[in-house]
Image (cartoon, helix red, strand yellow):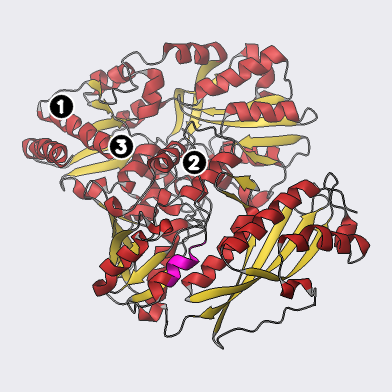
């Protein structure tokens, strides 16, 4: 393993020498953020390589108004909210799902199937599945919706917060002030969409896009491949996560998504409105759409006082540059979602990479 | 007579006829000892030493039965372990039950049998107790509290103030086994590989370390919050920093794989049959051998050392790839990853 690390470091050093400046690589996946920190990878990289944390944490990029919509529904006696664990700590205006109603009608689930089962077991309540996640989790949500339709489980609905990664990458790299030289692309999203999906980013903007898995060696060798491309002035979509990622992705999953969802404009925390970047249930399945059922709309929410999650997500600042970081915003009392989610840049930085207090 | 096929009623906690039946027919037979048989309001103990340790813990684990143990076994081992790592030989336990109305008597019997067997295997008696019942919905099946008293081992003096820079840190075996077992059973995750809790009393192991050995400065059993919480507590208590090596931390590959799938950090996951010992550098190898010669310490490892630095006390880990990261005090609730 050491030999592979040295080889990777040598490739990275070569890129730093050739380009003669700082190289900024955006890692677009919350799980990469956590993996990088847990493995201490940053401390092994050359000084000139900087990793920017991108909008790859589905909880972090969920707009404030979506969270407030969930909190509103959680107050209804006729609803049970089924949510992934991370979402329960995200703060809205009136608190979070965790503090608001301990126990009551909020259930943490591991999958959309669990949420559907909850609906089957509680026929007199409306189960609202808080469907967040990128393309990784969208197929499972679609399967649950299809099953609900087939079995007539009309007390099941989803509040779709599903988002698409490539439109967000495009929005970031289109920004005038962006500092991005390349993307370390999300591993599990790529299982679904295929690494070929990043070809448009590589071609239109000249940025290498490399998919890597989450083991430390995968991340290090992914970064090395990016540096190799930068040295050779190339910009290609590539994957080193060979175990599970192909160029075309999982076409069955893609078909299921297309059957149930259509793309729509949507709001991303920190990025504002991005065209065709979210998934909305098709009319055919509108009776399972919680937005329609409860007459809710998603609008651009404002950031909470002093919260700079948006800039952290865009890679414009590091977490510790936010005035609230580690002071009024901590994992125990998070202000913005970047601190809540275990895969949020701020939470990961706080847990694993924070400078010692006296420095 | 309260039938085994019956259910616990509120009256079983009312102090009257049904309470009496429950105690005499279902509880007493499991814990045969003269002190308890008196059924006095308080147990009279004759301890061999005037210096004692006293501890208490409550047990609310779900599911009640899991691979490697159950709430009853946990209630005995957990409290014994707290006494053991404090330098005491466990002498007696109290047992307090809060039972939800409607609990099957058969289930209660299973738990009581487990408590009795675990206590016997570990040479400790349940000498006093209490049973309360609450209305359906006011408790989740059964909650248990055990308090324990033990006699301090002569000349043993453990404490944060004994720890100094250069001391080594030993873990007695693999971490995360209990917590990952509970999480997987609770969430109904059917891993093909079987996870198993490490629920056990490490009292004998602790005694072997303490007797004939002046090198042990401090011990703790890394339960809730896992190894990460214990190491951070040691930092905070001693005002010194700790450096550990990831490669030296024993982790069962199945536990690691399960944690990876759910996005958990194994350092934060609970253990119920392990101890962390801070020992002098000179005695580290001897302590390690003592652990390895005990059935429960065969995978013991020296994982790091205490260091002095001018910064605020921190736990820092050198990772398997040679990087460095801080090990923070866990939040207190591990949430599984979304994707």
Look at discs 1 and 3 and give the one toward the viewer: 3
- Indicate whether A223 appears above or below A166: below
Give the image quarter of residue B34: bottom right
Look at discs 2 and 3 and give the one toward the viewer: 2
Q: Residue at x 86, y 49 (%)?
A: B3
Report in which chain the residue with disc 1 lies. A
Q: Residue at x 71, y 15 (%)?
A: A151
Within-10-Å neighbours for mark 1: few <14, some 14–19, many 20+: some
**B260 and A146: which one is in front?**
B260
Mark 1 or mark 3, earlier in chain: 3
Q: Secondary structure at mark 1?
A: helix
Q: The magenta stretch spans which residues?
A: B201-207
Residue wearing tag 2:
B195
Q: Residue at x 35, y 28 (%)?
A: A187
Q: Are marks 2 and 1 in contact (CB under 8 Å)?
A: no
Give the image quarter of residue B21: bottom right
Q: Position of residue A334 (x, y in %)?
A: 50, 53
Residue wearing tag 3:
A215
Direction from residue A306 to residue A301 in the image, left or right:
right
One can see residue A66 in this view:
yes
Report in which chain the residue with disc 3 lies. A
**A104 and A3: which one is in front?**
A3
Q: Quadrant of the N terminus of chain B?
A: bottom right
Residue wearing tag 1:
A229
| C-alpha gap between disc 2 and disc 1 | 43 Å
Q: Position of residue B251 (x, y in %)?
A: 37, 48
Look at discs 2 and 1 and give the one toward the viewer: 2
Within-10-Å neighbours for mark 3: few <14, some 14–19, many 20+: some
One can see residue A290 in this view:
no
């Amino acid at each position: 393993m050491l030999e592979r690390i040295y080889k990777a470091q040598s490739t990275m050093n070569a890129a730093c020498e050739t380009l003669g400046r700082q190289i900024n690589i955006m890692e677009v996946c919350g799980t990469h953020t956590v993996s990088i920190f847990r493995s201490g990878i940053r401390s092994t990289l050359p000084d000139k390589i900087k990793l920017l944390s991108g909008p790859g944490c589905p909880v972090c990029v969920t707009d404030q108004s979506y969270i407030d919509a969930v909190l509103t529904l959680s107050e209804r006696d006729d609803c049970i909210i089924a949510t992934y664990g991370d979402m329960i700590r995200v703060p809205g205006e009136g608190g979070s799902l965790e503090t608001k109603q301990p126990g009551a009608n909020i259930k943490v689930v591991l999958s959309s199937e669990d949420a559907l089962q909850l609906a089957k077991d509680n026929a007199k309540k409306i189960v609202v599945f808080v469907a967040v996640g990128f393309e990784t989790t969208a197929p499972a949500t679609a399967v649950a919706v299809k099953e609900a339709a087939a079995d007539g489980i009309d007390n099941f609905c989803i509040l779709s917060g599903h988002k698409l990664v490539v439109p967000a990458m495009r929005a970031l790299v289109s920004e005038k002030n962006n500092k991005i030289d390349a993307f370390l692309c999300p591993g599990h999203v790529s299982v679904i969409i295929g690494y070929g999906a990043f070809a448009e980013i590589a071609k239109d903007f000249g940025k290498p896009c490399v998919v890597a898995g989450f083991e430390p060696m995968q991340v290090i060798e992914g970064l090395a491949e990016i540096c190799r491309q930068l040295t050779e002035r190339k910009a290609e979509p590539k994957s080193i996560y060979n175990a599970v990622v192909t160029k075309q992705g999982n076409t069955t999953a893609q078909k299921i998504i297309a059957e149930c969802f259509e793309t729509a404009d949507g709001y991303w925390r920190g990025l504002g409105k991005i065209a065709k970047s979210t998934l909305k249930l098709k009319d055919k399945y509108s009776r399972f759409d919680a937005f329609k059922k409860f007459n809710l709309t998603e609008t651009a929410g404002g950031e909470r006082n002093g919260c700079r999650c948006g800039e952290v997500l865009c890679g414009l600042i590091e977490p510790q540059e936010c005035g609230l970081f580690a002071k009024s915003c901590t994992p125990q009392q998070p202000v913005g979602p970047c601190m809540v989610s275990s895969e949020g840049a701020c939470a990961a930085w706080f847990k694993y990479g924070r400078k010692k207090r006296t420095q | 007579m309260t039938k085994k096929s019956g259910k616990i009623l509120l009256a079983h906690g009312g102090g009257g006829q049904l309470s009496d039946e429950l105690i005499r027919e279902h509880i007493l037979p499991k814990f045969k000892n003269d002190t308890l048989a008196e059924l006095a309001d308080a147990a009279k103990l004759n301890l061999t030493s005037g210096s004692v340790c006293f501890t208490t813990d409550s047990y609310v684990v779900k599911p009640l039965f899991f691979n490697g143990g159950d709430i009853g076994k946990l209630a005995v081992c957990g409290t014994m372990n707290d006494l053991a790592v404090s330098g005491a030989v466990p002498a007696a336990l109290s047992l307090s039950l809060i039972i939800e109305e409607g609990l099957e008597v058969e289930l209660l019997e299973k738990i009581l049998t487990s408590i009795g067997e675990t206590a016997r295997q570990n040479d400790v008696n349940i000498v006093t107790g209490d049973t309360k019942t609450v209305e359906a919905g006011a408790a989740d099946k059964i909650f248990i509290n055990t308090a324990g008293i033990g006699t301090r081992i002569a000349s043993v003096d453990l404490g944060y103030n004994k720890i100094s820079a250069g001391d080594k840190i030993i873990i007695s075996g693999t971490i995360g086994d209990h917590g990952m077992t509970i999480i997987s059973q609770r969430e109904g995750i059917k891993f093909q590989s079987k996870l198993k809790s490490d629920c056990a009393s490490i009292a004998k192991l602790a005694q072997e370390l303490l007797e004939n050995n002046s090198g042990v400065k401090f011990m703790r059993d890394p339960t809730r919050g896992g190894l990460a919480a214990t190491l951070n507590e040691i930092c905070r208590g001693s005002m010194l920093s700790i450096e550990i090596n990831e490669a030296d931390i024993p982790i069962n590959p199945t536990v690691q794989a399960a944690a990876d799938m759910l996005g958990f950090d194994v350092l934060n996951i609970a253990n119920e049959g392990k101890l962390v010992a801070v020992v002098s550098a000179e005695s580290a190898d001897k302590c390690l051998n003592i652990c390895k010669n005990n059935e429960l310490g065969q995978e013991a490892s020296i994982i790091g050392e205490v260091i002095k630095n001018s910064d605020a006390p921190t736990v820092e880990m050198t990772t398997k790839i040679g990087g460095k990261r801080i090990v923070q005090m866990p939040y207190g609730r591990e949430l599984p990853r979304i994707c």
